[in-house]
Amino acid sequence: MNIETIRRAIAGGKAVLGIELGSTRIKAVLIGEDHAPIASGNYDWENRLENGIWTYSLDDVWTGLQSCYRALAGDVRARYGVELKTVGAIGISAMMHGYMAFDAEGRLLSPFRTWRNTMTAAAARELTELFSFNIPQRWSVAHLAQCIRSGEEHVARIDYLTTLSGYVHWKLTGERVLGVGEASGMFPIDSRTNDYDAAMLGRFDERFAAGQPWKLRDILPRVLTAGDPAGTLTEAGAKLLDPSGQLRAGIPLCPPEGDAGTGMTATNSVAPRTGNVSAGTSVFAMVVLEKPLARVHEEIDMVATPAGRPVAMVHCNNCTSDLNAWVGLFGEFARLAGIELSAGELFGLLYRHALEGDADCGGLMAYNYDSGEHITGFEAGRPLFVRTPESAMTLANFMRTHLYSALSVLKIGLDILLDGEGVRIDRMYGHGGLFKTKGVGQRVLAAAIDAPVSVMETAGEGGAWGVALLAAYMLQREAGESLEDYLASRVFDGKAGEEMLPDAADVAGFRAFIERYRAGLPIERAAVESL
């Protein structure tokens, strides 16, 4: 699209807006009528550990959203010389899971507990046994059950329980709804009805909610699927997002989705036997299934695509945070030496150099656990780098070690799915910050899973672009047109991305690394217990 065409689309309210609240960045992406990004805005933020809880305040949420939207509007003004006053549709996405409980007056009853918290082990185990269905610690129902078990006084006053994307959508539209993909991280979904599993709701109420003034279904968001209308931007919502008053009310919104669902959408991975890996602060793999798994695995979560198809998910709490900290340290050294490098230059330089290291990292080892990891059995973490006197301590090996470490827990989980269950994947896509340096994260992931990995040009746009596509689908789909068909024919149209085959030496090197990684887990355990 040329500049004049884009300008007319924006002025005519035909562009579509997607906003995603990620773990370290809030991003807004505006797309044109051809679904390509035409403007963007960003805001960096970070969670805090307060009283043992990983959290963001509600002020953090709205400061970040308003700053992000203001940056987007400024980008539109600078590029196209028009004011952003309306759009065709809006989609809201955010990091999945967590716990946001509100009373009847809309007051937050307890600090927002993000996906990163690992304090619900007892409740998660009890729910898994009760449902014969794996309930991870980070799921909303696990947090609720743990609050009940712990006797937290606010539980009786809960009027609404939702996630971060559901909260933002509620405040913008007044609608208490969630997309089915996001809802599947709150409570198990029955894929036949695309709604919460009724039998499991009954079991929860019997075991946990006896004596409470509410039933679980009554406090959960209503479940919608991709394409369903999910309300419109209210006057109050418009002012919340854009305090300048330029943004008009009345814009339709699609169902709010989690970052897993928007990642699937952004990589055209919503059909059976497709999968994607989203790698940023956390890392997760999503594989759309042909049939149910043979048995329950505590390491594998069962969730859904935005259209309701069953998905096996391997979720790891930690990915790039420790890696980013080391890159920041090298950036500090560069500045001390009088060398000014942008973040992109610094990451690119170090990531590419990592590929020159030994395939098995020369005996170096790292554990990137800023927080706990349920797949390896840790409720807390300590970032750790370790080597023996005989290890080949080079910069290339050091950086390669931290890249391997970022994907090691993911590999352990995927091995259960691919080897243990025999799940087949025709296409695996990578997206997120780890894949921004061309050919590096992609090569490491291909080595980890011993399978081809594709990365699209839009990999860095991530979930904000994905939820914009979901909003466009709601706005433009024809009767009976599935999400899979819409993405395949109208958005990607045969674009498969740039594929990289696994290198045999890299595969063997990663296998050797993961054997040492597993053997060294007691070192991480000792660090958690001693530091």
Image: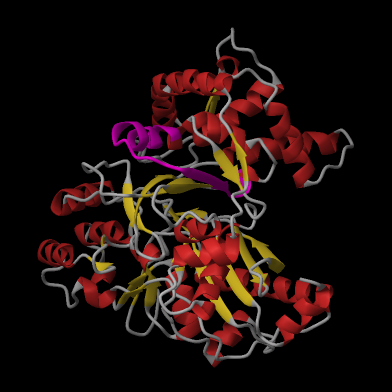
Q: How many marks?
A: 0
Q: Say which residue appears at 59% left-offset and 50% top-offset.
A: 496
Viewer can see residue 464: no
Residue occupying the far top of the picture: 390
Q: Say which residue appears at 58% left-offset and 70% top-offset.
A: 18
Q: Is residue 224 above or below residue 8?
A: above
Image coords of residue 194 (percent x, y)? 29, 68
**In the rendered structure, which segment of residues is drawn in magenta?**
411-434
User: Is 174 a magenta residue?
Assistant: no
Q: Is residue 145 above or below residue 121?
A: below
Q: Is residue 43 above or below residue 87?
A: above
Viewer can see residue 300: yes
Nearer the observer, 256 or 528: 256
Q: Say which residue appears at 59% left-offset and 19% top-offset.
A: 359
User: Is 423 a magenta residue?
Assistant: yes
Image coords of residue 292 (percent x, y)? 25, 49
Image coords of residue 132 (percent x, y)? 16, 50
Quarter of the image where one finds residue 189:
bottom left
Image coords of residue 221 (percent x, y)? 33, 74
Nearer the observer, 179 or 139: 179
In the image, taking residue 342 as reference, residue 104 lies left or right, namely left
Nearer the observer, 318 or 104: 318
Quadrant showing the N terminus: bottom right
Quarter of the image where one finds residue 148:
bottom left
